[in-house]
Image: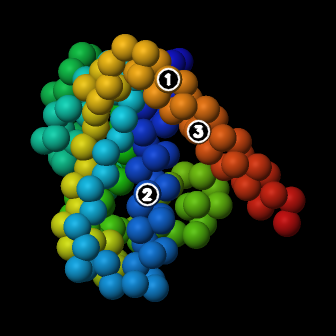
């Protein structure tokens, strides 16, 4: 559904940013830098789901979806798409704490995105202070500029999705 795709786009965006920062942290000391991440979307559904930072924090702190998580978010639990909101929340927590859980190579290869627990962290620092915010396109710009920006976002998102798909297809051929 469209809602699942919109939520998944945010999840993948956070995952890419997290992987980029982890890779950068292996070569540079990022503890001296403040990182500000702004995710822009045209989805009212996504904004409704991510505006509750407490929900994101509680869900992101869970070790698995099977854990007894008491959902108190917008709308019924069946419409929350917890299978996507859960990893999105984990990436969110990893980013705002500045010390992400390790992402295993096997998890990246099979696309599950599963992470180890914090006890096994290789203590990578991805920034002195990391903030993540979600903004609706209407809060960023309006009118003709909003239309052009939305078109550009769609174009870049499509290019990123194609790049990711092609990269995964090449990996499977190896």
Task: Give the x, y percent position of residue 48.
Answer: 25, 23
Residue visible at 49% across and 55% down in the picture: 16
Residue visible at 53% across and 18% down in the picture: 1
Q: CA distance from mark 1 to mark 3?
A: 12 Å
Give whichever of discs 2 and 3 has the lower sequence position: 2
* In the displayed structure image, the side of residue 58 where residue 81 appears, left or right: right
* In the displayed structure image, the side of residue 4 where residue 87 appears, left or right: left
Residue visible at 35% across and 54% down in the picture: 91
Please name which of the two marks, 2 or 1, marks the residue nearer to the observer.
Answer: 1
Residue 156: mark:
3
Query: How many residues crowd around disc 1 within 10 Å: few (fewer than 14), some, or many (20 or more)?
Result: few
Which residue is tagged 1? Answer: 148
Give whichever of discs 1 and 3 has the lower sequence position: 1
**Pick the front one: 163 or 105:** 163
Q: Quadrant of residue 124?
A: bottom left
Q: CA distance from mark 2 to mark 1?
A: 24 Å
Query: How many residues crowd around disc 3 within 10 Å: few (fewer than 14), some, or many (20 or more)?
Result: few
Helix, strand or loop at label 2? It is: helix
Q: In which quadrant is the C terminus drawn? A: bottom right
Which residue is tagged 2? Answer: 17
Q: Are marks 2 and 1 in contact (CB under 8 Å)?
A: no
């Amino acid at each position: 559904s469209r809602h699942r795709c919109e939520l998944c786009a945010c999840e993948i965006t956070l995952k890419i940013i997290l992987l980029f920062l982890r890779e950068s942290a292996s070569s540079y000391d990022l503890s001296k830098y403040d990182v500000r991440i702004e995710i822009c979307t045209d989805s009212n559904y996504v904004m409704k789901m991510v505006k509750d930072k407490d929900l994101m924090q509680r869900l992101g702190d869970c070790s698995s979806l099977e854990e007894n998580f008491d959902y108190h978010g917008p709308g019924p639990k069946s419409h929350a798409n917890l299978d996507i909101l859960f990893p999105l929340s984990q990436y969110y927590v990893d980013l705002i704490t500045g010390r992400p859980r390790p992402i295993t190579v096997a998890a990246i290869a099979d696309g599950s995105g599963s992470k180890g627990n914090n006890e096994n962290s290789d203590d990578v620092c991805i920034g002195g202070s990391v903030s993540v915010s979600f903004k609706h396109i209407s809060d960023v710009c309006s009118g003709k500029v909003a239309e052009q920006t939305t078109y550009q976002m769609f174009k870049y998102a499509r290019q990123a999705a194609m790049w990711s798909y092609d990269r995964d297809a090449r990996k499977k051929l190896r």
